[in-house]
Amino acid sequence: MSKVVLITGASSGFGKATAELLAKRGYTVYGTSRNQVQHEQIRFLVMDVRDRDSVRKAVAQLLDESGRLDVVVNNAGMGIGGALELATDEEIAIQMGTNFRGCVNVCQEVLPVMRQQGGGQIINLSSIGGVMGLPYQGFYSASKFAIEGFTEALAAEVKGFGIKVSMVEPGDFATNFTARRKNSELTAKNDAYSASFARSLSIIEKEENGGLKPEKLAQKIVKIIECRRPRLRYVVANLEQKLSVLLKRILPGNCMVGILRNYYKV
């Protein structure tokens, strides 16, 4: 019997690439999107990860149809660019609500199912931005830092139930994430920040658009699912970005801040 996999945010980018690869390998794949999507190989469910009731209904529908849930990939996410000082309450709520609280909502809904089954697997999408605070992406980084801490604690709490927990930290990938990023109008118009923000954003977008293909990350997620004893943390990035993660672990904090300021022309 093929494993049943649920992937949030599966209509594009990482989620779509992963869902399609898993479906080709014989998995029963459910994807989620805020709007109805039709796909020959993937069963799409309407879900807004920020809305707990929407999450509950989608998971219930999956269980009614499949009878079990073996793997969850928390992929749904978005980015808002701008100065931390100028972020509005609405921008903060959307960023943290989608990336972090959305992940929490899904986990809290599926964990009772997995405990009752006697096992399961959860893979949460973090980011290199969850390892280091990226300038002008501060609340995006904050949401991913939150996922890091949440995932580490979750792995410890549910291991005894036979539930495996991992997180993936992608670097720059060429997906539609760049085009969908919401940028702060207040920052773009602010005399103190506008020029620095424009320089930094230009570098960010260039790196993303020239990044790795999402299929590479999809292949890594498949390997994690098929691994008997998966690790807690996986960095999926180019060599330079993998090196930056290593430097973050060994360099003094002020030194790393200086490197980030220089790299992003802040």
Image (cartoon, grey):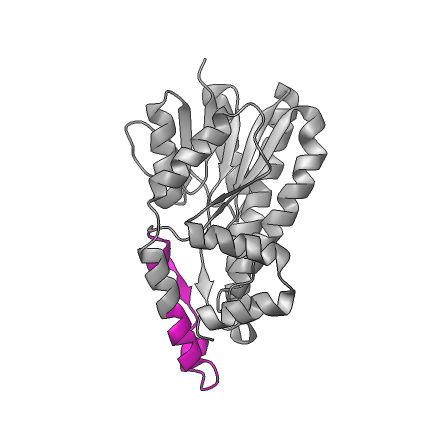
Which quadrant would residue 17 be assigned to in this image? Answer: top left
Percent across and percent down for residue 152 are 66, 42
From the top left corner, tell me how far across and down residue 20 is, in percent. 33, 32
Depth check, front residue: 8 or 228 = 228
Front residue of this view, candidates 145 and 250: 250
Q: Is residue 215 left or right of residue 225?
A: left
Residue at 64% across, 65% down: 253
Question: Is 46 in front, or is 153?
Answer: 153
Q: Residue 142: within the magenta?
A: no
Locate the N terminus by quadrant: top left
Question: Does residue 59 lie above or below 130 as drawn?
Answer: above
Q: Is residue 183 magenta?
A: yes
How many numbered discs, if any? 0
Instruction: Tell me if I can see residue 62 in this picture.
Output: no
The location of residue 256, given as percent across then percent down, is: 57, 65
The picture places residue 195, in percent across and down from the top left corner, at 40, 81
**Considering only vertical position in the picture, is 17 above or below 94?**
above
Secondary structure mostly seen in magenta is helix
Q: In this view, does 96 lie to the left or right of 266?
A: right
Residue shown at the point (45%, 63%) measured from the top left: 80
Where, by quadrant of the figure, is residue 247 drawn? bottom right
Describe residue 179's horizontal placement relative to residue 164 as left or right.
left
In this picture, which residue range is highlighted in magenta? 176-201
Specify whether residue 65 is in view. yes
Q: Residue at x 38, y 75 (%)?
A: 198
Give the residue furthest to the bottom.
191
131 versus 83 height, above or below: above
